[in-house]
Image (cartoon, rainbow, N blue to C red):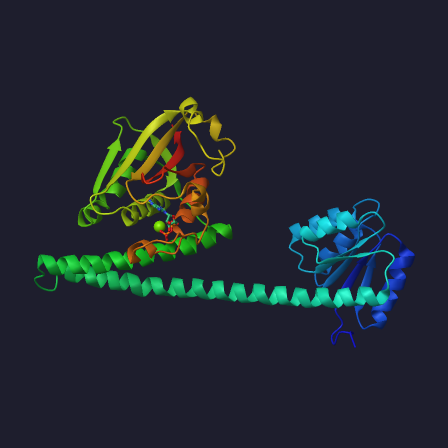
Amino acid sequence: MLAPKTPDKILIVDDEQEVGLVLKEYLDDEGFDSSLALDGSAALDMIVTENDFSVILLDINMPGLDGVTVLNRLQDSGCDAAVIMMSGQGSEEVAVKCMRNGAEDYISKPFAFEDMLQRIERARAHRLERLEKQLLQKEKEDFILMLSHDMKNPLTAVIGSIDIVREGCLGNVNEEQKEYLQSAIDSCNEVVVMIDNLLDIRKFEAGKIQMAINSYNAQELISKISDQFARAARHDGIELTVELEPHSSNIAVDKNAFSRVLGNLLGNALKFTPEWGKIVVSSKRITKDEMLALKIPSYAPIPPGTLDNACFVKLAVSDTGNGIPQGELERIFDRFTQFPRKTERERSGAGLGLAYCRLSIESFHGLIWAECEAGQGSEFVILLPCCP
Ligand SMILES: Nc1ncnc2c1ncn2[C@@H]1O[C@H](COP(=O)(O)OP(=O)(O)O)[C@@H](O)[C@H]1O
Ligand SMILES: [Mg+2]
């Protein structure tokens, strides 16, 4: 028997009261708990007040809000019910489009009740599968977040302890020992950066990130952060140069987030540049016209209002490393994107750094993109509005 064990709530949305009432009676006899709405807005009101329908049977042709509009509003509202479109003659094509737009199924009017019942059962089963998958995914993500968060404190303690030994506070340490201890600290720091990226991307997505935006001298900030990478570059046999123009420009950023953005870019440049390679960090002020003359790719849209600024700071980090395939330049800013690489070092990381960079830079009303020519290394460009 197809009847459900617990009465699932079904919403019938049909402007033909007669048809709706007969269907309701049939479904209630089959053990469902069904309700009828005679137009789109009444349906949306009911869904808002009783957000627990498992299936919605949605007529396409209705006066006022039609089924397609109601479906779109449902998608935006986050309603998780399975939707079966009911199409009249000539609206099958629309029904197929609705399925591409999130509807579970469609049925053509007039229909046999048995046929409708079968479709409802299938839609219910699919919905349960979908909800279970979503729950599992959420549990997995929550677990990773919790683990990451809890790992950070002991890791920071490990870094602190190793640093005390490395500094010679507990007795003499020779240069070779220092080198090994530093390398342990660097590895721990990489994990801390990864955790910070993950946790902050989550905060951005939940709209819970907190930024302390202030005006800073761009040159000072960039040179300070770059200096922190000088030792690692020397250690890897890479030449790191910083080219800053003499006159100063101010940018409005969160200092910590900006440091982490540049840190992620420099970390990547070091990771993907072989020995004897070169990394250049440069920054200069450009006018709005110079900015508009740049080849800014479409995946880095200019934020609204940004063009009210007369000048911008253009920060670039270029390297002579492996480069990135042209077609992949856009995708690297999505989270968890990494490409097959040869060495263990290049494979380290989680593909979160650039996603964090993009979210942060966007929160400063700036843009970030990558440029790359085959075999010529990569260049990451950031544009930030100058503040007075
Ligand atoms: N400077 C670079 N040179 C070559 N490839 C890069 C560079 N920066 C980033 N990439 C590519 O983009 C991917 C994503 O970078 P990122 O988001 O920082 O993640 P991760 O560093 O964890 O791999 C990298 O895995 C790499 O394939
Ligand atoms: Mg990275």
The single residue placed furthest to the right in the displayed view is 18
Image quadrant assignment for residue 350: bottom left
Q: Between 153 and 68, which is closer to the camera in this rendering?
A: 68
**Image point (25%, 47%), residue name:** 274
Q: Residue furthest top?
A: 289
| Left or right of 339 on screen, residue 279 | left
- Above or below — where is 246 with respect to 327? above
Above or below — where is 368 with respect to 249? Answer: below
* Residue depicted at x 78% and y 54%: 43
> Compared to 3, does 167 lie above or below?
above
Q: Image check: 199 left or right of 346?
A: right
Q: Residue 120 in the image: state x and y as whole percent.
A: 76, 65
Side (left or right) of 241 relative to 48: left
The picture quadrant where one finds residue 245 is top left
- Location of residue 234 in the rendering, given as x and y in whole percent from the top left corner: 18, 46
* Count of marks overlaid on the render: 0
Residue for point 86% across, 52% down: 15
Quadrant for the C terminus, please.
top left
Tell me if residue 60 can be seen. yes
Quadrant (top left, top right, bottom left, bottom right) of the N terminus: bottom right
| Image spot of residue 78 (x, y percent) | 64, 55
Residue 176 against residue 366 in the figure, above or below: below
Residue 167 in view:
no
Q: Name the residue furthest front.
A: 374
- Residue 300, how many percent across, how many down? 47, 37
Nearer to me, 147 or 112: 112
- Corner quadrant of residue 195: bottom left
